[in-house]
Image: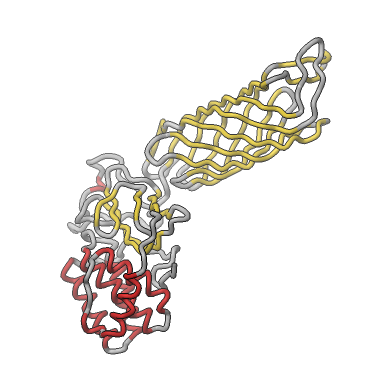
Amino acid sequence: MGASLLTVWWLLAAPARAQDCPDRLARLDMIEAAEQKLLEADLAGADLGLRSLEKALGCGSLAESDLLARMWLLEGAWLTLQGDPQAAVDSWRAAARVAPGRWVDAYGPELREAYDEAVAAPSPEETARIHLDPPLFRWIGAVDGHIQNFPARVEPGLHVVQVGPGEDDIRYARVLVAFPEAPSVVVTGLVEPTNAFDEASQPGDDGKPYKPPKDPIPPANLSLYTAVGSALALGRGVDGARGASAEPGVKLTLPLETGFTVRPGSRAFVRLAGTAALLVGGEFQFDDAHGAGHSPAAVGASLTGGAWSGLGDMGLLVGYQWPDRIPVRGVLAGRLPRFPLQVEGRLGMNAAFGRTPEPALDVVFALTPRLFRRSDGAE
């Protein structure tokens, strides 16, 4: 699937910074001016008009289907005239999807033939998913001018995502290409007011809607962490001491963990947890000052840190488990968008003095209900 010059995945479409946000009539004037530039063979002027229109979608009201269709028709024509008809396919198909049958006669029969050929191709059977980071609570999110629940399932291809307090108060817009192979994550950087009477949710002194600061810090919060799961380690078997069960070489344990996670108003997180792990089919063997001993479970604590987004965490875990184990793991966690549950995979080893390192793999399911949050990102 071709990616348009104007709609590549990491294109940042920030909220409009102009003092006056273009209304519907102003947007129509913008698209008409850009169309005229194209008809006059002023491709640079048409490109500039398209970019201005995309920025104008980041404020004011939700986009209208007819406007989006004309925008993508213009983009498809521009790309074709630029010598990139393959990239234009995405734009032609997006225009036909939001407003079937819409066309600009002045573009002529050759461009219409390219449009018809792109639209006639079979539609993909797969769907794509669009996530918002951070997730919405009271504000609305829309795809192609229609309010959606997120994560939103959409047809693969070009889309416009808009976010704001209401249909006529959009604070953010972005044009993206959604692919079926992996979720598309739109990082808005917006922080919703903590309550309906927050001063930030009201119009400013000049009567214009509030615009959030540039690059706001994500909210600080504190969450509980309670997890259960299973862990597998491959090590050396040890015979049982004093008639105890042996410690198997293939160690399957059932870990239980509880603690707290802190996200200190940035994209970092730190988690401290106490741990206990029951060994299945044997007992841990150890030697200490009192001689040989054994235990059916290992107990200890762990410290995890790394980076996070609206979809999950990625980082490094280190800790200590008695008897005589130092777990070191790379951590990758994914969580549900509207329920405090995450699935966490870990890969690494159990290391200790005087013991051969044991490769290890853990999978745990964790409840992470939030205890505390501040919208200003302060600790």
Residue 214 is situated, as x and y percent measured from the top left of the image, at: 38, 58
Q: Quadrant of the C terminus?
A: top left
Please give the name of the residue rendered at 38% of the width and 75% of the height, measured from the top-left corner. 88
Q: How many marks?
A: 0
In this view, the residue in front, 373 or 176, is 176
In this view, the residue in front, 153 or 161, is 153
Residue 56 is situated, as x and y percent measured from the top left of the image, at: 27, 67
Task: Relative to 311, say whether 71 is above or below.
Answer: below
Please give the name of the residue rendered at 37% of the width and 45% of the height, measured from the top-left corner. 135
In this view, the residue in front, 256 or 73, is 73
In the image: residue 162, left or right of residue 329: left
In the displayed image of the protein, which residue is found farthest to the left? 25
Q: Is residue 14 visible?
A: no
| Colour mode of the rendering | secondary structure
Q: Quadrant of the N terminus?
A: bottom left
Please give the name of the residue rendered at 42% of the width and 83% of the height, measured from the top-left corner. 83
Residue 287 is situated, as x and y percent measured from the top left of the image, at: 81, 19
In the displayed image of the protein, which residue is found farthest to the bottom? 40
Residue 215 is situated, as x and y percent measured from the top left of the image, at: 41, 56
Task: Relative to 290, say whether 69 is above or below.
Answer: below
Occupied quadrant, residue 11: bottom left
In the image: residue 317, left or right of residue 179: right
In this view, the residue in front, 347 or 93, is 93
Please give the name of the residue rendered at 60% of the width and 29% of the height, measured from the top-left corner. 230
Q: Is residue 56 visible?
A: yes
In the image: residue 323, left or right of residue 28: right
